[in-house]
Amino acid sequence: QKKMILDLDTGIDDAMAIAYAVADPAVDLIGIIGSYGNVYVEDGVQNSLKILELLGAGDVPVYQGLSHSSETDHFDRMPVSAQIHGENGIGEVQLPAPKRQPETGDAIDFFINAVKQYGKDLILVPTGPLTNLDAAIKKAPEIANEIGNVTIMGGAVTVPGNVTNVAEANIQQDASAANNVFRHVPLTQVGLDVTLRTLLTRKETQQWRDLHTKPGEAFADIVDYYIKAYEVTSPDLHGCALHDPFAVGVAINPDFVQTIDLNMYVTTDEKYYGRTTGDPARLDDPNTNVKVAVNANVDAYLEAFMDHLTNLFKKN
Ligand code: BDR
Ligand code: CA
């Protein structure tokens, strides 16, 4: 069993990412680091605690990470986040208040220590801005090459962005952090290129509802909110994108995608802020550090996703 840490801004697809990580027996979820984006960091942390309890995984430690990018004084939530994930980040579904608090320790130190302890057996899946990972590699630069597997949800290479023409939301929140990470950390990029192909519909959420369990019904309600938002913002897709849980799936089973090897960077210039693109300065450097997912084995992934989540929702 590999150890996994999730670093997320718990909105709706992040909640599904937690469920996938809890459900897959191939991994041991050893911690969650809270980020900002879909919601403020404090609210995201509360959502993570609530979702873990709902899933019978109330013993997974949750740390509160950084609340905004180092380029700004505070974080302004994008109005579209409330539209897609709800004001509370989880589709306005009211889950019971969590029985515990987040850990009191520092989130960045927790991560650095986990890399020291588990090294190549550690998987990190950031599905929010890369602010926490950037802070960790600035504090302890040597860990950049010691983490077993970093698989991020973020960016877009072969398709346009989703918050601007060129930028995807997670990268756009903190392009300078993303740029530092993209330049220094070997990683797999699961961007809009592939996450807009793994879609969930009401047919699947109905299967969860029909389980008549608390998690089955809660997740059906939460994800139906997200599906409804996609019907408004992206009617052509006919479903909601499984951005974040796809990154978790790929981290565990790389065969869910085909990748190309590149040296990448993230644009921090105003005009193309947040674009993830090939690094002209390293075109001839054969030691590429980024695997960009460009194609997805959609059916295989969706089958695994539904198997894992449905089994988990049945149990609790
Ligand atoms: C990403 O942005 C967030 O809103 C989602 O949770 C996902 O991580 C998609 O662009
Ligand atoms: Ca997210």
Image: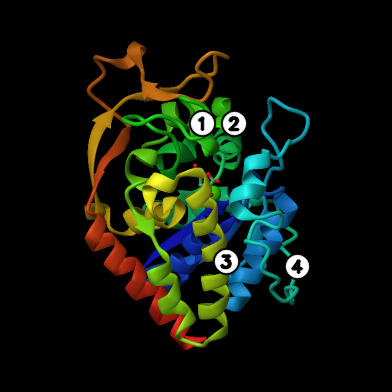
For label 1, the crowd category at 10 Å Cα-Cα, with few meaning under 14, some 14 to 19 and many 20 or more, is many
Q: Position of residue 265 (x, y in %)?
A: 42, 23
Element at badge 2? Answer: loop
Quarter of the image with the N terminus in it: bottom left
Q: Position of residue 69 (x, y in %)?
A: 67, 32
Which residue was labeled with disc 3?
A: 222
User: What residue is rendered at 73% in x and 27% in y?
Assistant: 72
Q: Check contact, mark 1 vs mark 2: CB within 8 A.
A: yes
Q: Residue 75: which numbered mark, if any?
A: none
The amino acid marked with disc number 2 is Asp
Q: Quadrant of residue 80?
A: top right
- Viewer-nearest of discs 3 and 2: 3
User: What residue is rendered at 72% in x and 56% in y?
Assistant: 43
Q: Nearer the viewer, residue 42 or 242?
A: 242
Which residue was labeled with disc 1?
A: 178
Which residue was labeled with disc 2?
A: 174
Q: Position of residue 15 (x, y in %)?
A: 54, 62
Q: Nearer the viewer, residue 234 or 30?
A: 234
Q: Earlier in the sequence, mark 3 or mark 4?
A: 4
Q: In the image, is 136 to the left or to the right of 23?
A: right
Q: CA distance from mark 3 to mark 4?
A: 23 Å
Q: CA distance from mark 1 to mark 4?
A: 29 Å
Scheme by which the image is coloured: rainbow
Q: Earlier in the sequence, mark 3 or mark 1?
A: 1
Which residue was labeled with disc 4?
A: 101
The amino acid marked with disc number 1 is Ala
Q: Earlier in the sequence, mark 1 or mark 4?
A: 4
